[in-house]
Image (spheres, rainbow, N blue to C red):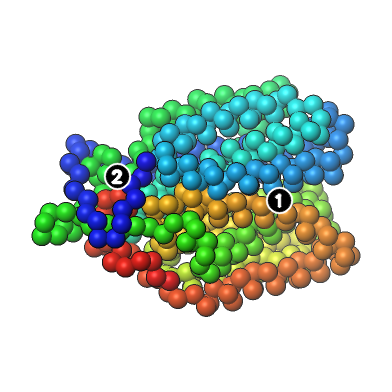
Amino acid sequence: MLRHLSIGQHVKSPTISNRRVFSGWRILILASITAALTGPGQTIGVSVFVDHFIADLGLGRSGVSTAYLIGTLIAALGLPYVGQKIDQVGVRRAMTAIGILFGLALTGMAGVQGFITLTIGFVAIRLFGQGSLSLVSTVSVTLWFERMRGTALGILSTAMSVLMALVPVGLSLVIESYDWRIAWLTSAVVIWLVVIPIARYGLIDRPSDVGQFVDGTAPNRHDDGEIRTADSTTRSEALKSKEFWILAASSASVGMLSTALNFHQISLLGDAGLSPTEAALMFLPQVIGAAVAGLAFGYLSDRLTGRVLIPIAMALLTISLFLASFLSPGFLVVMYAISLGAAGGASRSVMATLLPRWFGVGHIGSIQGAASFLNVSSTALGPVAFSIARDLAGNYDTAARWYTLVPIAAGLAALTLKPVPPPQNEQSRVGLPKRDNPPQF
């Protein structure tokens, strides 16, 4: 369990381990793999099964969509609890349990027979895959970096986007060779064979467990030879701050609208004159945009404040919605796909970096869990909300223009934030964040 220390409390320096190489980069690589393996529980993975659900379960497209909506919303309710348990038991034990449960959930998807069992299956794979495994992967990296946290999380976001793009390809190959139910079972086996060993034998809860330091840099010692640390903000305290809600609103805006646009992509781009195959190919520029933005915003997050980063991310989402309102084949549709992917990559890096900077890492699982609940809920509501707007407006163009108000409002709200400078070299330390005063925003 992570130690919770009061302000002014001292921590004895850990015994330096024989590990000469900083383990944080290895943790980052392993977390990137586990984050990518959330794919079967993500929209990008589930999408390859939708037509098979419709054909074999006797459900219409609206029935499958409704089951997905209900399952995602119920799954989101469990994420604050999952985040709290990650804080209590550590990332190794938490990821081991999540890997076991995610594999069981995927196994259950192979046996769905109708609307009720499909909904239950969606609850399980969205809770343990998209939600919990993503959450614990992010936290495992967060605890190892501070000064370079943005860069590390940007790499995590980029690697996850690129590797996850392979998931639907792999699932499709299994479906074509065998059956869609076999594809779910195959996913379960992969999770058990990869995630559980990584969690059990590859992860380390925090640097101090092996005598290492955050960022791999030894902190300054005081005259008494001790390292002083301070309490982090609790989840209840974070939820009372406007900073949390502005950041959560910006992330939810991207989650809601990017999911909505992706869910309706074939129809949206079809209206713009693209064939279904051409529309599907536009997911590739999205992955490229997400990868480049993840790295760029990870780097910038180590150097800029939230008052700058959030509005830029919201500007990217606004641009993608604006482009969606007058799409045509060629340059415009490619720029739309790149900007939409970039908005997602930027938002993930900014959210993952600013939460621990503002609130510390002592309760980061609980705080990140609350933020994930809001983000996952937004992804469930996005396709429905955009569909309603399209029906009211009569076309996708007007609906997209209406929704530009959402990121614009979030970006303007972020301009009211007080700047919190990124951590400097001398603040690197073992374990929990060092703060001379309670968190300031």
Say which residue label 2 marks.
207
184 or 69, nearer to the observer: 69
Nearest to N terminus: mark 1 or mark 2: 2
Left or right of 359 in this view: 215: left
Image coords of residue 214 (percent x, y): 30, 51
Say which residue label 1 marks.
380
> Which amino acid type corresponds to the residue marked 2 in the rendered image?
Pro
Left or right of 118 in this view: 419: left
Q: Is residue 355 visible?
A: yes
Left or right of 264 in this view: 82: left
User: What secondary structure is marked by label 2?
Assistant: helix
Residue in view at x 43 percent, y 71 percent: 441
User: What secondary structure is marked by label 1?
Assistant: helix
Residue in view at x 22 percent, y 50 percent: 11
Q: Is residue 157 visible?
A: no
135 or 79, nearer to the observer: 79
Specify few, some or many for label 1: CA neighbours under 10 Å numbering under 14, 14-19, or 20 or more.
many
> Which amino acid type corresponds to the residue marked 1 in the rendered image?
Ala
Cα–Cα span, label 1 and label 2: 36 Å
Q: Quadrant of the N terminus?
A: top left
